[in-house]
C-alpha cells in the first residue's frame, strides 16, 4: 500500500516539491495522532531515495536503492527515534547523526533523515540539532514528524518548511474502516475521527472490555456495585485505556448537560445510558470528578498504588451519584 485513501492531497503537496525541484532541507510534518503522518513521511523518504520513481512519484520497489530500503540498510536513509517508546531522543543520538551527516551521501540522489516523534528531542538534543539546521549538508532532507507542535522549540519550527496534515474526511475513513470491522462508526467516534487509532480500537476484546467497564461504572452510580470490588477487578486492565474511557464518559455526560442534541460524542452507541445518567448528575461535582481524573493521569506516571487509585476514583464516583 502506497498511501491511505485520505492522503492524496498531502501526497500531491510533497510531490510538488520534487516536481518543482524545491525539496526543503528540513520538513516538519504535523497533525493529529493516528492519521498516518509517519507513513506519509516514510513514503516520501523512499520516493526521494529511489532511482526511478513511478509516474505518481512513488518509489519503484525494484532499483538497488529500493532493495536496500527493504532490508533496512540504505546508507543514505537514517531513522532517528527514541531508543525506548515514550523516552527522549538524546543528544548522543543527535551527535552520532551529525557525525554521519558530515560525510557525503553515498548515492547520487538525496539523503533522508526521519526524526519522529520530533517533540521527543530533549533540550540538549534540540540545540545540537539546531546547529545542524543552521548549516545543513548538501542533498540532505530532514523530515521531522510530530503531533505535538507546541512541544517543539520555536527555533526549530522556524527553520522548517511545514506540512500540516488535516483530520481526514469522515466518510472516506468510514469506508476504509468498514472493510476491516463491523463497528466502524463506534470505533471512529471513540477515536474522535482518527483512523489509525480507530483501527486499534476495532477488536472485539477492546469493545467488550469497554462495555463491561461501562456497566460496572453505571452499576456503581446506581449503588448496585461496590467501588472497592470493581477497583480490584480493574487492576488487571490497562490503566491508560481505563482512564481514557472514564474521562470520555464524563466528557460525554457534560455534553449531554450542556447541549440538547450533542454532537461528536465519544460513546454515541451508549447514548441511552449516558443521557439518562446526565439528567441526575450534579454538574459542579461532575467537573470536580473530571479534575480528579486529570490528576490521576499525572499520578499514574508516579509509583502510585493502582488499587488505591481506582478505589479513590470509584468511591468519589459513588459519592457523586449518592447526593
Ligand atoms: Zn526504486
Image: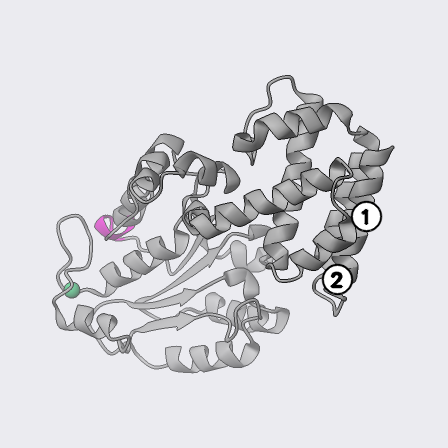
Provide residue 178's location: percent of width, then percent of height.
32, 38
- The residue segment tinted magenta is 17-21
Q: Nearer the viewer, residue 185 or 79?
A: 185
List the single residue furthest toward the front: 224
Q: Is mark 2 within 8 Å of ligand 1?
A: no
Q: Nearer the viewer, residue 64 or 300?
A: 300
Provide residue 258's location: percent of width, then percent of height.
70, 22
Instruction: Give the alpha-carbon distance from disc 2 to disc 1, as whole Å.
Output: 12 Å
- Above or below, 260 against 243 in this view is above
* Picture residue at 66% right of the left edge, 57% below the top: 233
In the rendered image, which quarter is residue 112 located in? bottom left
Q: Is mark 1 within 8 Å of ligand 1?
A: no
The local secondary structure at tag 2 comes to helix
Q: Nearer the viewer, residue 247 or 128?
A: 247
The local secondary structure at tag 1 comes to helix
* Picture residue at 39% right of the left edge, 38% below the top: 184
Residue on which the image places disc 1? 315
The magenta stretch spans residue 20: yes
Q: Can residue 32 be seen?
A: no
Amino acid at each position: 500500500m502506497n498511501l491511505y485513501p485520505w492522503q492524496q492531497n498531502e501526497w500531491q503537496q510533497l510531490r510538488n516539491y520534487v516536481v518543482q525541484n524545491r525539496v526543503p532541507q528540513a520538513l516538519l510534518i504535523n497533525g493529529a495522532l493516528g492519521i498516518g503522518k509517519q507513513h506519509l513521511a516514510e513514503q516520501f523518504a523512499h520516493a526521494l531515495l529511489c532511482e526511478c520513481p513511478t509516474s505518481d512519484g512513488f518509489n519503484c520497489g525494484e532499483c538497488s536503492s529500493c532493495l536496500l530500503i527493504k532490508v533496512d540498510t540504505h546508507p543514505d536513509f537514517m531513522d532517528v527515534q527514541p531508543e525506548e517508546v515514550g523516552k527522549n531522543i538524546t543528544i548522543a543520538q543527535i551527535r552520532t547523526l551529525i557525525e554521519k551527516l558530515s560525510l557525503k551521501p553515498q548515492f547520487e540522489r538525496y539523503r533522508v533523515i526521519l526524526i519522529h516523534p520530533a517533540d521527543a528531542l530533549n533540550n540538549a538534543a534540540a540545540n545540537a540539532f539546531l546547529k545542524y539546521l543552521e548549516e545543513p549538508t548538501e542533498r540532505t532532507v530532514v523530515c521531522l514528524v510530530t503531533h505535538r507542535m507546541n512541544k517543539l522549540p520555536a527555533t526549530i519550527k522556524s527553520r522548517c518548511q511545514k506540512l500540516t496534515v488535516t483530520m481526514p474526511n469522515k466518510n472516506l475513513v468510514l469506508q476504509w474502516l468498514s472493510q476491516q470491522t463491523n463497528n466502524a462508526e463506534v470505533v471512529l467516534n471513540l477515536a474522535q475521527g482518527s483512523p489509525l487509532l480507530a483501527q486499534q480500537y476495532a477488536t472485539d476484546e477492546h469493545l467488550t472490555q469497554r462495555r463491561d467497564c461501562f456497566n460496572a461504572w453505571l452499576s456503581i452510580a446506581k449503588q448496585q456495585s461496590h467501588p472497592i470490588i470493581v477497583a480490584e477487578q480493574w487492576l488487571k486492565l490497562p490503566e491508560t485505556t481505563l482512564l481514557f474511557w472514564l474521562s470520555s464518559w464524563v466528557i460525554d455526560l457534560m455534553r449531554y448537560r450542556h447541549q440538547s442534541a450533542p454532537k461528536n460524542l465519544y460513546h454515541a452507541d451508549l447514548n441511552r445510558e449516558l443521557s439518562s445518567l446526565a439528567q441526575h448528575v450534579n454538574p459542579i461535582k461532575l467537573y470536580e470528578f473530571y479534575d480528579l481524573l486529570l490528576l490521576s493521569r499525572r499520578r499514574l506516571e508516579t509509583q502510585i498504588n493502582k488499587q488505591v487509585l481506582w478505589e479513590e476514583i470509584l468511591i468519589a464516583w459513588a459519592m457523586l451519584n449518592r447526593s
